[in-house]
Image (cartoon, rainbow, N blue to C red):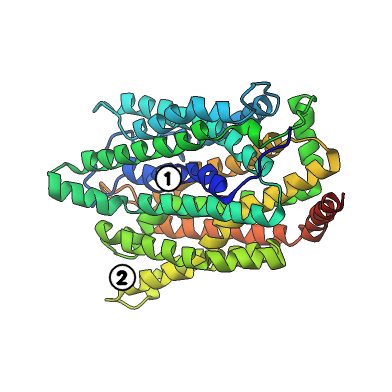
């Protein structure tokens, strides 16, 4: 049976879950440590055990979140294999999305809703729901991520797809970045305590998120658009095949290091703004919105650049710029005094370029590698490739999340759980990780990958 043509409207619908993912990712990456390792300025009470209590170097929040990323990484290939080999009459991907959309959103909310004042109980609550969140994230997002390159096979349309994919993620993140302003508004308008203002804000995000997760899951009929050849080999052999692909290995390692560097930055961004730059929490939205709007303005440029010149060079430029940005954070003391907000806005504009590049191109670059492999083998293993990449990159992020809470604790004094020395060190480490990715991407042979894809497309048109 001839499959239906994928339209731009369908692509937009398929990318809607990224708005929810942007919201949830901002909640977890930008505010989790800030919420559970609070500064005195935040007004948030201490909810879990503080300090380095594991091996003298790890915090409770750092260990729990790091183990969550490990669970996420390990579950990725398992879910991918199940999805790749699914014989469900409604498709290999959509049924997973339908089943796990609600648990995904609910678990993101409950992470911040520990009901007790007992620190040990809250430690356990936090662990359960963070780990559940990563499992449900995998069960929804691995099939969703595999569906994109299955439905969209045209190279240029694929770039457009991942541009919308990133656009929704960024707009969702933008709403997430508005959290401090929303929290401040709730405290003023409703007279809420800081902790409840944060929780009600996240409740609103969870409701928005679950609606957007369900729309494509319920509206798209997968079988109308996808014809797949299911892999018959074992999970182990599929993973072995993925890691034998030199292009996949280089792109995955590059994304491992740049993703880890970005992980350091995202986990500490609120600290950088409030503690290092001296910007009030309620005004942090100005800084974050500036970087987001700046990056959105660059989206057309990045889209056109990658279509004409490929993704490799923009990725290298983006990573170099982000490395410089991380190192600039360490020079915060030499910035002009009395103009902190202006300096922070200029910094936000500077990071707009790497934000735009690193939001759009990594997934598109990996989709090229997956399509290259499908052409070479004739077998659709999108899920396994996506999961193998996620497995590696999430292990790196878990390392970052394990290290960050301990790093920011360096130099802390009194009742404060964050020290300036630790914040500066986190920026240096994050910058070094991103710098390594530049070296790795330099060895990626994009000409071979894109040449194979274009030759295949030309052959299909002529037949």
- Above or below 400: residue 2: above
**Residue with the mark numbered 2:** 341
For marks 1 and 2 on the same chain, the one whose residue lies earlier in the sequence? 2
Q: Is residue 286 left or right of residue 190?
A: right
Q: Is residue 432 left or right of residue 65?
A: right
Residue 114 position, x and y percent, is 30, 29
Q: Is residue 74 visible?
A: yes
Quarter holding the N terminus? top right
Comparing 217 with 328, the one in front is 217
Residue 268 position, x and y percent, is 41, 53
Comparing 319 with 101, the one in front is 101
Residue 185 position, x and y percent, is 20, 51
Residue shown at the point (53%, 61%) measured from the top left:
356
The tally of labels here is: 2
* Quadrant position of residue 109: top left
Q: Is residue 311 left or right of residue 343?
A: right
Residue shown at the point (33%, 40%) measured from the top left:
36
Residue shown at the point (54%, 40%) measured from the top left:
398
**Residue with the mark numbered 1:** 405
Q: Is residue 330 visible?
A: no
Residue 362 position, x and y percent, is 62, 53
- Above or below 280: residue 17: above
Q: Secondary structure at mark 2?
A: helix
Comparing 194 with 226, the one in front is 226
């Amino acid at each position: 049976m001839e499959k239906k043509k994928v339209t731009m409207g369908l692509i937009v619908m398929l990318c809607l879950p990224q708005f929810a993912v942007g919201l949830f990712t901002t909640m977890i990456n930008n505010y989790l440590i800030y919420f559970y390792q609070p500064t005195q300025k935040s007004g948030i009470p201490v909810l879990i055990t503080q300090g380095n209590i594991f091996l003298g170097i790890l915090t409770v929040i750092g260990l729990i979140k790091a183990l969550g990323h490990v669970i996420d990484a390990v579950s990725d290939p398992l879910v991918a294999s199940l999805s790749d080999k699914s014989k469900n009459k409604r498709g290999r991907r959509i049924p997973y999305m339908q089943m796990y959309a609600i648990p995904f959103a609910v678990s993101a909310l409950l992470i911040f809703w520990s009901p007790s004042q007992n620190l040990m109980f809250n430690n356990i609550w936090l662990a359960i729901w963070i780990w559940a969140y990563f499992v449900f994230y995998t069960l929804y997002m691995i099939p969703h991520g595999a569906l994109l390159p299955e439905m969209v096979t045209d190279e240029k349309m694929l770039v457009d797809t991942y541009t919308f994919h990133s656009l929704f993620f960024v707009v969702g993140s933008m709403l997430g970045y508005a959290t401090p302003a929303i929290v401040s508004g709730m405290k003023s308008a409703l007279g809420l305590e800081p902790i409840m203002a944060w929780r009600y804000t996240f409740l609103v995000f969870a409701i928005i998120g679950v609606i957007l997760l369900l729309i494509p899951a319920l509206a798209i009929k997968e079988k109308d658009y996808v014809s797949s050849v299911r892999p018959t080999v074992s999970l182990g052999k599929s993973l072995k095949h993925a890691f034998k692909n030199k292009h996949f290995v280089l792109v995955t390692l590059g994304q491992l290091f740049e993703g880890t560097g970005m992980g350091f930055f995202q986990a500490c961004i609120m600290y950088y703004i409030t503690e290092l730059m001296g910007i009030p929490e309620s005004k942090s939205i100005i800084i974050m919105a500036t970087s987001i709007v700046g990056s959105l303005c660059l989206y057309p440029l990045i889209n056109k650049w990658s279509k004409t010149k490929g993704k490799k060079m923009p990725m290298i430029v983006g990573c170099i710029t982000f490395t410089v940005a991380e190192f600039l954070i360490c020079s915060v003391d030499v910035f002009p005094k009395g103009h902190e907000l202006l300096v922070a806005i200029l910094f936000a504009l500077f990071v707009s370029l790497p934000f735009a590049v690193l939001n759009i191109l990594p997934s598109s670059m990996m989709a090229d590698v997956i399509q290259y492999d499908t052409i070479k083998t004739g077998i659709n293993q999108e899920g396994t490739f996506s999961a193998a990449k996620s497995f590696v990159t999430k292990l790196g992020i878990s390392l970052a999340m394990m290290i960050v809470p301990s790093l920011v604790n360096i130099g802390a004094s009194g009742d404060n759980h964050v020290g300036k020395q630790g914040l500066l060190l986190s920026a240096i480490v994050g910058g070094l990780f991103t710098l390594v990715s530049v070296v790795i991407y330099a060895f990626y042979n994009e000409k071979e990958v894109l040449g194979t894809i274009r030759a295949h497309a030309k052959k299909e048109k002529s037949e």
